Image (tube, rainbow, N blue to C red):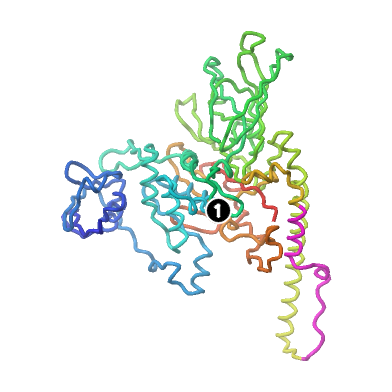
């Protein structure tokens, strides 16, 4: 059906609004908001037989051109028009295009949707995901909506209204459509939700998206999440106060062998099992100061997913003690549980367990302790001995090469600065006399073109990659990771506050790199992005700004300000 022009009546005024029956009801509500100032989360649009809901099927409503809809709700400030007209990339000249592409766009908050906005922006740090969504068809409702949203975000220089994606998210996961019951009447709106839960739900919805081969083509025989986001691990969840409630919990999707060794019966064979997980957890206790510590150890851990100590909920640790029934003793016994990753994915998610159930107050609370996280993470510490043995040769050599690359960049910058200063001085003095060209700076005499080094280094590193890792496209072949995205939570309450997304600038602009082995002879120049630029983009809903790397320490936690909650690490590239 073609779009219709209808009327809405609000506060005694009749206003014209366009209604597209092919779009969700949320799009119409947003159009009503534009002219009435009534936010969608406090708006009631009356239709025949009741109230227009976000999932209402327009075919059942049967709207007609010129029809009048009654709108009920308290109007706030009307949305301000953009400071300048929206211009699409196709309509820009070269200078406008360069400026627009320098800054990614934000997402409008549609009423307590900062959790969704921050999550979507952080997931944009996975470019392979956008490739998989674009090359795969057909897609289910949420992956399709995510694909369309990312497409819209890449085609405009202004903030995007994620109405369709929000509608799809609430349709697939109804909990995200819950109403805030703490506010009554017309002031009631949608409730704040958990960004980590949103991350997990979106990831789960992507499990059927086909994978990719090394050329970037769709690969129906594999799934994207299995390739790029899943590791292998074994987890045991136990209740301290109710051992009989022991249960195995399939958390989400990394495989890790777990060894359980009974201290009281040393001759009892160790039990080894496997589990899939999509993230690892950093448990925060009164002694946790560093992310690595929170991941590795938590102390006594008994039978079930939640463990309460010092009034806080604790997640899963890699080294811990558990109580379980001993076959040899015929009773409960304490086991040493050691968990390690036997597969590391390209993208590794770390969940900072900041929300916990407080026994003393009987409510969910936020753990605001300051915990330092790493911008570079060596995951070999959490890998099995077998996997560590496979990845160590290439990991060790890559660390050495990165130092060499850093030194070369410093030399080239000093040389460039010296040459520019010399040229500036000659121009200032008006020296036009012909003569010999100035000698190059001593540091740069022996430096070849950077692509020469990169091609040679890539060949050396690829020769060190383990055959099994090379065959498993989508896994980490080094075990070394860079932090590329963060979701933070601001506020003291678990069920309130504000979420903000952070993404490293290099994700959008790319780093200089040598061609892959198949393109070693290419003469294409490397991108102009400065590899020493470690700054970030801060996505506070529609507002996007530069976040200096020096400020990362301010989101470690320690108060009500923004605290790191979900961290996304990307395996270091060999190039």
Q: Secondary structure at mark 1?
A: loop
Viewer-side residue, 131 vs 539: 131
Q: Could you tell me residue 81's position as x and y percent?
A: 34, 63
Q: Position of residue 360 (x, y in %)?
A: 49, 24
Image height of 269 relative to 418, above or below: above
Q: Residues within 10 Å of mark 1 (few under 14, many from 20)?
A: some
Q: Residue furthest front?
A: 221
> Which residue is farthest top?
330
Q: Quadrant of the C terminus?
A: bottom right
- Taking depth in this image into account, of 300 and 236 the one nearest to the observer is 236
Residue 525 image point, x, y percent: 66, 68
Q: Within the magenta stretch, is there residue 457?
A: yes
In the image, which residues are magenta? 433-460
Q: Which quadrant would residue 437 be assigned to in this image?
A: bottom right
Quadrant location of the N terminus in the rendered image? bottom left
User: For residue 564: magenta?
Assistant: no
Instruction: Work out whether 364 lies above or below 483.
Output: above
Question: Number of callouts in the render?
Answer: 1
- Which residue extends farthest bottom? 433
State left or right for residue 172 relative to residue 221.
Answer: left
Q: Is residue 149 above or below residue 48?
A: below
Side (left or right) of 42 relative to 342: left
Residue at (56% x, 22% y) in the render? 238
State the residue position of label 1: 217
Q: Position of residue 141 (x, y in %)?
A: 40, 45
């Amino acid at each position: 059906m073609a779009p219709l022009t209808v009327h809405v009546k609000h506060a005694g005024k009749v206003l014209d609004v366009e209604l597209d029956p092919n779009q969700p009801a949320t799009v119409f509500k947003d159009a009503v908001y534009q002219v009435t100032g009534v936010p969608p989360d406090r708006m009631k649009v009356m239709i025949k037989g009741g109230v227009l809901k976000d999932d209402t099927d327009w075919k059942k409503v049967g709207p007609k051109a010129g029809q009048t809809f009654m709108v009920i709700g308290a109007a706030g400030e009307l949305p301000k028009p953009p400071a300048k007209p929206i211009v699409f990339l196709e309509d820009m000249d070269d200078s406008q295009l360069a400026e627009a592409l320098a800054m990614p766009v934000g997402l409008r908050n549609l009423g307590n949707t900062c959790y969704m906005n921050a999550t979507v922006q952080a997931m944009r740090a996975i470019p392979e995901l956008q490739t998989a969504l674009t090359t795969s068809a057909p897609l289910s409702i949420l992956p399709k909506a995510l694909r369309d949203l990312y497409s819209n975000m890449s085609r405009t220089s202004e903030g995007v209204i994620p109405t369709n994606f929000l509608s799809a998210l609430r349709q697939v996961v109804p909990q995200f459509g819950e109403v805030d019951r703490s506010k009554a009447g017309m002031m009631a709106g949608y409730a704040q939700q958990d960004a980590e839960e949103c991350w997990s739900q979106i990831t789960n919805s992507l499990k059927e998206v086909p994978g990719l081969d090394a050329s970037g083509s769709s690969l129906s025989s594999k799934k994207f999440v299995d390739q790029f986001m899943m590791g292998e691990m074994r987890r045991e969840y136990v209740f301290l106060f109710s051992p009989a409630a022991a249960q195995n919990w399939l958390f989400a999707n990394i495989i890790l062998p777990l060894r359980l060794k009974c201290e009281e019966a040393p001759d009892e064979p160790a039990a080894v099992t496997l589990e899939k997980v999509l993230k690892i957890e950093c448990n925060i206790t009164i002694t946790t100061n560093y992310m690595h510590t929170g991941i590795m150890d938590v102390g006594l851990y008994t039978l079930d997913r939640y463990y309460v100590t010092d009034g806080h909920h604790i997640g899963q640790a890699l080294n811990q003690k558990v109580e379980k029934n001993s076959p040899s003793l015929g009773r409960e016994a304490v086991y040493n549980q050691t968990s390690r990753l036997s597969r590391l994915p390209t993208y590794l998610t770390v969940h900072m367990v900041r929300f916990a159930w407080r026994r003393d107050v009987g409510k969910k609370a936020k753990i605001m302790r300051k915990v330092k996280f790493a911008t570079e993470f060596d995951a070999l510490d959490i890998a099995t001995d077998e996997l560590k043995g496979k990845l160590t040769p290439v990991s060790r050599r890559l660390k050495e090469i990165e130092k060499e690359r850093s030194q070369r960049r410093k030399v080239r910058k000093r040389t460039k600065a010296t040459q520019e200063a010399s040229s500036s001085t000659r121009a200032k003095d008006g020296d036009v006399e012909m003569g010999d060209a100035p000698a190059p700076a001593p540091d740069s005499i022996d430096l070849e073109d950077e692509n020469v080094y990169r091609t040679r280094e890539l060949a050396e590193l690829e020769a060190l990659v383990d055959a099994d890792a090379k065959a498993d496209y989508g896994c980490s072949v080094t075990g070394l990771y860079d932090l590329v995205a963060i979701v933070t939570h601001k506020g003291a309450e678990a069920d309130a506050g504000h979420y903000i997304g952070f993404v490293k600038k290099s994700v959008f602009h790319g780093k200089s790199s040598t061609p892959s082995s198949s393109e070693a002879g290419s003469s294409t120049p490397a991108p102009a992005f400065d590899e020493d630029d470690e700054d970030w983009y801060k996505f506070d809903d529609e507002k996007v700004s530069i976040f200096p790397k020096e400020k990362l320490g301010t989101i470690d936690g320690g108060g009500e300000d923004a605290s790191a909650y979900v961290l996304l690490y990307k395996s270091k590239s060999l190039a």
